[in-house]
Image: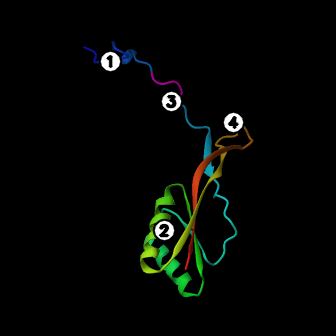
């Protein structure tokens, strides 16, 4: 006896159910992410990402203040925004600081490159938007 699967309220044997259209196709393009555009990097800029160690980012900010700089600019993008906020709060516990925060939206561009010569020979561009946070920490 065939197994029975419920499909939109009706019972249909499993071997008669249809697969999603296009689910068996192999991808024709690969996605290559471009790095986001950065402002000109100054010695007192700290770019936060998810892969670097939080303790290392915190010690870098402390070292910038110890070198005599009066301000540090912390930049966070997308999923790293909460790390940038946490970093600025940790610095406020150790120093007497004031902060100025700005938010914005950044356009990110990805390249879709064909995997085979049979597909189009022209690369396509994909764009998306992510949130950005800049925190200026002033001593």
Residue that appears at 66% across and 63% down: 38
Q: Which disc number belongs to residue 99?
A: none
Disc 3, SS: loop
User: Magenta segment, which residues?
Assistant: 19-23
Q: Distance between the residues labelled 4 and 3?
A: 17 Å
What secondary structure predominates along the stretch shown in magenta?
Answer: loop
In the displayed structure image, the side of residue 83 where residue 13 appears, left or right: left
Quarter of the picture containing the C terminus is bottom right
Quarter of the image holding residue 8?
Answer: top left
Q: Badge 2 is on which residue?
A: 52
Of pointers 4 and 3, the one earlier in the residue sequence = 3
Of pointers 4 and 1, the one earlier in the residue sequence = 1
Q: Badge 3 is on which residue?
A: 24
Q: Badge 1 is on which residue?
A: 6
Crowding near the residue tagged with mark 4, few <14, some 14–19, many ≥20 C-alpha atoms within 10 Å: few
Q: Where is residue 100 in the image (x, y as percent from the top left)?
A: 57, 67
Q: Position of residue 128 (x, y in %)?
A: 62, 46
Residue that appears at 72% across and 37% down: 120
Q: Where is residue 63 in the image (x, y as percent from the top left)?
A: 52, 83
* Residue 53 shows in the view: no
Of pointers 2 and 3, the one earlier in the residue sequence = 3
Q: Distance between the residues labelled 4 and 1?
A: 38 Å
Q: Which disc number belongs to residue 119?
A: 4
Crowding near the residue tagged with mark 1, few <14, some 14–19, many ≥20 C-alpha atoms within 10 Å: few
Q: Is residue 118 above or below residue 67?
A: above
**Which one is nearer the viewer's eye here, 39 or 113?**
39
Q: Do the residues labelled 1 and 3 touch (CB within 8 Å)?
A: no
Of pointers 2 and 1, the one earlier in the residue sequence = 1
Crowding near the residue tagged with mark 2, few <14, some 14–19, many ≥20 C-alpha atoms within 10 Å: few
Q: How far apart are marks 2 and 4 (CA)?
A: 38 Å
């Amino acid at each position: 006896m065939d197994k029975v699967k419920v499909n939109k309220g009706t019972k249909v044997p499993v071997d008669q159910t249809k697969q999603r259209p296009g689910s068996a196709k192999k991808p024709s393009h690969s996605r290559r992410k471009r790095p986001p555009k950065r402002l000109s990097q100054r010695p007192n800029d700290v770019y936060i990402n998810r892969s670097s160690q939080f303790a290392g980012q915190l010690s870098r900010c402390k070292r910038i203040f110890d070198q005599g700089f009066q301000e540090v600019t912390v930049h966070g993008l997308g999923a790293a925004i909460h790390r940038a906020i946490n970093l600025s709060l940790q610095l406020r516990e150790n120093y007497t600081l004031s902060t100025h925060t700005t938010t914005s939206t950044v356009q990110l561009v990805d390249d879709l490159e064909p995997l085979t010569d049979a597909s189009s020979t022209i690369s396509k561009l994909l764009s998306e938007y992510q949130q950005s946070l800049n925190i200026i920490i002033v001593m």
